[in-house]
Each structure stands twice: as structure tokens, then as C-alpha cells.
Amino acid sequence: MPSATDYDVIVVGGGHNGLTCAGYLAKAGKRVLVLERRPIVGGAVCTEEVIPGYKIDVGSSAHIMIHLTPIVRDLELERHGLEYIDMDPYAFYPLPDGSGAIYFYRDVERTCQSIATVSPRDAEAYRRFLDFWTPLNEAVFDVFLNPPSVTRLFGKVASSIPRLPKAEQQVLEVTRRLFTSYAQLIEETFESEAMRAAMTWLAAQSGPPPDEIGAGDFFGWHAMLHYSGAKHPRGGSGMLTQAMARSLKAMGGEVVLDAPVRRIIVQNGRVQGVETADGQRYSAPIVVSNAHVLTTFLQLVGPDHLSADLVRRLNHIRIGNGFGMTVRCAAEELPDYTAARSYGRPHESHHGLQLLSPSMNYVRRAYEDYLRGEPSRDPAVIAMTFSAIDPDVAPPGKHTVFLWSQYFPYKLSDGRQWDDIRESVADSILEVLYRYAPNMRGKIIDRFIQSPLDLERRIGLLHGNVMHVEMSFDQMFFFRPLPELAGYRTPIRGLYLTGASTHPGGGVFGASGYNTARVVLADTKQRRWGPLVLGAGALAAGAVLAGRRLLRP
């Protein structure tokens, strides 16, 4: 078994951020070990045959941002099997009465033409929306690819203001839009219920409800999708993390599966290594935890190694009472939306996120149910049909239909248990699909349900929150998960955090792992590789955005 000098770095957890961090450290010459508790890497970016013959994503599915970072190139993921398929249009909104639909393409002109079929005024409003939010979010993107900093955030946002439309180059107005609710901004921007509903449901994907103050940019961030697009890895979302694991091994790193870490070993305020559930000890002067922040400190490290004040503050991090749930289906055919008839055959309505939410108030009511501790009676749903663009995920002539839905509390107010109601709640989610695509009734072959409790059990997402901790402004950037932990370092020497608990948060991005690697290399005074290539990578990402900005309509 490994000796005390075998590893420079141990990474706890093989999620995509942990693997990103491990990959960069291995490329810098570090001897890296990744310990994953499950029999497969990926964490919340994982694909398994939980329905025989079908490749089912058991976590995140659509990839929105990681392909704009340097990660895919730097870790040579395409050479190790990653192949991205464009999801274009990346979103589709069928009007609930079946009278039409809005398609959101990467191409701005095509998108505006589609919006104009519902509301010509909203098509023009959408152009103004892009002109305002794109420069701001290019600045925020740069902030995401660096450790969090007050000066960087506000400096970058301020530097983007001269690129805004001249009539809107007002610091106070920019600040107001950033710190108001996205519901308020959407109502100010669009007049049709269709555009308001579509944009509200897209904005809600990061967690904050429509009327939460300080969440304006969750609406504005949608502008970036015309530059990033949305992508699907051929063979399923988990093909990203499989490629990362192969890349790591090719650089000399190691991955051990079925190796749940029982504790992080700490002596005299310094990390010494880890101990797995079977009693095996692995030693290293640096441990990077890709686990949830509360799991890391309160379970793996233990309160005895922490100050009483830090324990108190950790216990006040808001992880939320659940968030959403999924029903992953094997199906005989694809949805035949009454708003975009396809007769069960592949159609561009099936390429991206299918937004099944009739109004802004519909999302609000779903959230009100959640606040009462009840599963949403009329949940908003996103349908995803990857078999329409990727034949590798289903048998010939069959299809996958994934349904992500909000909002669902982890702790139920009436004493019911998720294991008792998960089937009936899954039925209610499917009923939403049937209202938009009646042909799907009776066409579901099998289904794999993930309630908030299921997400916690399988993937380790506490309370089933896919973002780890709530994505409110006071838990973002230099506040995430706490100000004293926001830079990936911890009070325990040699222990670092990475993953959705840290800046910039959840989603398939990899920025946290990328940033954590930079911090570790800086702290170990690595000069052989890290600063040169990591710096070049960030510049490359900036160049991509700059090039696309020059081409912007």
C-alpha cells in the first residue's frame, strides 16, 4: 500500500471540480491521488445504465460553460474521449395553448425572428437585453475564472460599463439591475407572458426564486448562452468526467474507486492525509476536498480541530431545504408538442432545454408550495431529450426523456417521507409533460426517480441541493461558503476546498477546480508549469469571448 511519501496531493471526491483540480496539479508534476466513494467517477456529472440499455445522467445533463474555459483544451479531454454535440436551439418554449413556440438559438438573429412570431416588441427588447447584459457578464466570467476578490469583481464590472449602450452607462442603474430580483427585471423588459415565463424559468435554474433581491444577474446571465451555447457529451454527461479521469491517469495521477473517506487526518493544525472507510491511510501534505463544505468540516475533519466560532458559522450556512427533483425516462418515442408538431420524430424542439412553464406566476406558486414544506402541486418542468441528437444513449428506435422539476422540499411539513411519496410526485411531474405533449401518455417504458432524498443518498448532495449551498448573493463570490473560506484555503494548513460549495458555485463549469489548482500551486511556489499555462489558459478564454464580442450583431 502507499507509503507516507507516495503522494503530493490527495483529492477527496471525483466530481468534475475535483478531477479538474487533480488534472492541473498532475500536469504541474504533482503526484496526485483521487479517492471516490462510488464505483464510478463524476459525482453530479455522471452517466449510468440505471435503466438497462439506456445511458442515464444521474446528475447534471446540459453543459453550459465549461467549454468556454481552458479546461477542455489544457487537459486534452477530446484526446481522451470527450466529444461535444451542440444543442441548438439550446432552449425551446412551447406556448401552453399550443398556438406557437419560441426557439432560442445560438444565433441572435434567428432567436429574435422566433421571438417576433409571438411579440415583435419583445424581439426588440431582447436585443436591448443582450446589449446591456453581455458586456457585464463577460466581466463576471473573468471573475469566475479567478479566486474571488472584491476588487476584481467591482473593478471588472466597472470596466464593462463604457461598453454598455450609451443611454445605460449609469453606475446606479447597473447596480440597481444587479441587485434587484430577476422577476422585476423580466417584467420591466418583456411584455408577453410567453417571454416572461420562458426567461423566468431559465433564470430559476440556479436556485434563487423569482422575487429574491440581489438575483438580477441570474436573468442577465442568459445572454451568455449566445456565446457559450449548450452542449451534450456524446454518450452522456458523465463522458466529461470519464475523459477527465483518463487524462489524469495519462499524466501519472491515480484514481481509487469505492473508497469513501472516513476522516481527514489533522495533527497540530496541519493536514496529514486521509483514512478511508476500510481503515486504509493515505498520506500527503495537501488534501483538496471536493465534498460538501459541511461534510468536509463537520464530518471528515471534525469539530475538535476547528474553532468554536468556525463551527458556529458553518452551522449557519444556508444549504436550503431541497431544490428540485428529476424523473429520467426511457420512452417509446419523443414528445410531440402541440405547439410544434413532430409526430414523435426528432425535431429541433428536442435539441435543447424544453421549458414547460406557462407563466411567471406559475413558478411563483410552485415556490410558495415549497415554502410551506409541500411538493409543488403544479411544478415547472424542463424536459431534455438527448436521444434526439445522440443515438448512443438509447437503443435503436427508443428514446430518453429527462424531466427536471422545481420546487421540492427535502423536509416535508406534514410528516410524510420521500420514500412514500416519490412515485406519486413523479406522476405529477409527468402530467406536466402530458399537457404539452399528449402522445407521451402510455409511452414511458421505465423511469428512474431522484427525489431530494435520493440525490442526497446517491450523490452526497446535502438536502438534495444540487448547488451545495444556496446561491443567494450573501453566499456568492467572496462570501462563498464563508468569507474566511472563500479563497479555497482553510484554517487547517494544507487543506483546501473545491467544488460547488465554493466560488463560483454549482453547474458544470469546472472553474472552482481550476481556481483551486492555481491556489495550491501558488502556495507550494510551483513555477515549473502552473502560472505560465494557467495564465495562458485564462487569457485564451478571454480571447474567445473578445473574438465573439467583435462579431456580435
Image (spheres, rainbow, N blue to C red):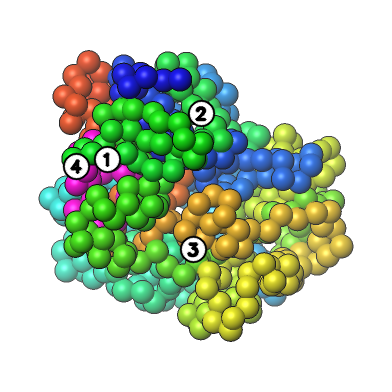
Q: Quadrant of residue 338?
A: bottom right
Residues at discs 4 and 1 in contact (Cβ within 8 Å): yes
Q: Which residues are magenta?
A: 478-502
User: Which residue is denoted by mark 2 in the rendering?
Assistant: 256
User: Which residue is denoted by mark 4 in the rendering?
Assistant: 269
- Disc 2, SS: strand
Disc 3 and disc 1: Cα gap in Å?
27 Å
Residues at discs 2 and 1 in contact (Cβ within 8 Å): no
Residue at left offset 56%, top offset 63%: 452
Magenta span dominant secondary structure:
loop
Q: Residues within 10 Å of mark 3 (few under 14, many from 20)?
A: many
Q: Is residue 172 magenta?
A: no
Residue 83, x across and y down, in percent:
57, 29
Disc 4 and disc 2: Cα gap in Å?
27 Å
Which one is in front in this view, the residue at disc 3 or the one at disc 2? 2
Position of 341 relative to 301 (above/below): below
Disc 2 and disc 1: Cα gap in Å?
22 Å
- Disc 4, SS: loop
Which one is in front in this view, the residue at disc 2 or the one at disc 1? 1
- Judge left or right: residue 355 versus residue 546: right
Q: Residues within 10 Å of mark 1 (few under 14, many from 20)?
A: some
User: Which residue is denoted by mark 3 in the rendering?
Assistant: 463
| Front residue of 163 and 143 | 143
- Judge left or right: residue 106 versus residue 135: right
Residue at left offset 33%, top offset 33%: 273
Q: Give amino acid for label 2.
A: Val
Q: Residues within 10 Å of mark 2 (few under 14, many from 20)?
A: some
User: Which residue is denoted by mark 1 in the rendering?
Assistant: 266
| Front residue of 306 and 539 | 306
Q: Give amino acid for label 1.
A: Val
